[in-house]
Image (tube, grey):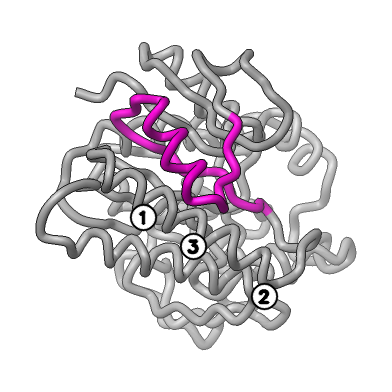
Amino acid sequence: MTETVAVTGGNGRVGRAVLEHLSAEGYRTVNLSRGKRDESHSDAYLTTDLLDAGEVYGSVAKSDADAVVHLGMLPTPEATPGYRTFESNAMSTYHVLEAAGELGVETVTLASSFSAIGGGFEPDPITVDYLPVDESHRLTPSTPYGMGKQTLETVADGFARRDEGAPRTITSLRFPWVVDDAIARETFAEADRTLSGMRESGSLHGQRNTLFTYAHTSDVVDLVRRTVEASFDGHERVWVSAPDTSAETPSEELVAELFDDATVRDDFPEDDHAALVDTSKAATLFDWEPTWRWREHR
């Protein structure tokens, strides 16, 4: 039974929310971060450079964790050279999984992202073969950030192939843009979310390249907890998304205008603003269903 969860990157916005949720659910939490010491969101804090294998091993050991949630990666690629960006995603993940394996930690959750598919921060339009996109869709990243996320998942595949030892249960969560109440108010209540409005504001490329996905922290932390409590064998990639798009324009119109080369699958939801990402795998594996819609909180 999982009692203690170590969360890397617990100083970040999503990390703090995860720590607070896990604590509220009765878990002992340990924040593994290299930034300013902050013990207000967890039971313990261990200063950890996640690119230093020895520090990662020492902190995971000292935390006495039953599970690790690895969020401690660069959230965006703008402020660092390409090799540092790639290193943050790929090498920190290797260190966490290696430490977990050596220390017998059975469960690891990893922060992948939309960039793994070849979207997100890519300068060119995303390649979309079919909609809604699921975990079987091909990956075409070209930036250090996207390649790092793809590599993160490949590294997890390798650890999962080992016949013996931990970690036994590895989940890569492909996060979209995660919003809290304040960000949601600023973004959704005060901006024109139609196609024409996004074109005018210059935000359309970024929104298109993430298929207009987003997720609220309340749904995200709930899913993270469920991955910590999971017990399947191996490594699973899982898409994360709100049930609707971030656009005011109906999904059918978005697809027709922006993704006309993509095959629309027969099971595409009939909801006017249905998400362009399929989260049914998260529902099957973790009994998770996103509920927060920005349209209901305007």
**Disc 2: which residue:** 122
Check residue 95 in the rendering and tell me which mark sits there, or answer none.
none
Which corner quadrant of the image does residue 83 belong to? Answer: bottom right
Q: Earlier in the sequence, mark 1 or mark 3?
A: 1
Q: Decide: marks 3, 2 in contact (CB < 8 A)?
A: no
Query: Label 1, label 3: how many angstroms apart (C-alpha)?
Result: 14 Å
Q: Residue at horizontal 69%, vertical 23%?
A: 37
Q: Residue 161's image quarter?
A: bottom left
- What is the secondary structure assignment of the residue under circle 2? loop
Task: Provide the residue span drawn in magenta.
Answer: 47-75
* Residue hosting label 3: 276
Q: Is residue 11 magenta?
A: no
Question: In percent of the image, x 41 and y 26: which residue is there?
Answer: 62
Residue at 55% x, 50% y is 52
- Which mark is nearer the camera, 1 or 3? 1
Residue 23 vs residue 216: left or right? left
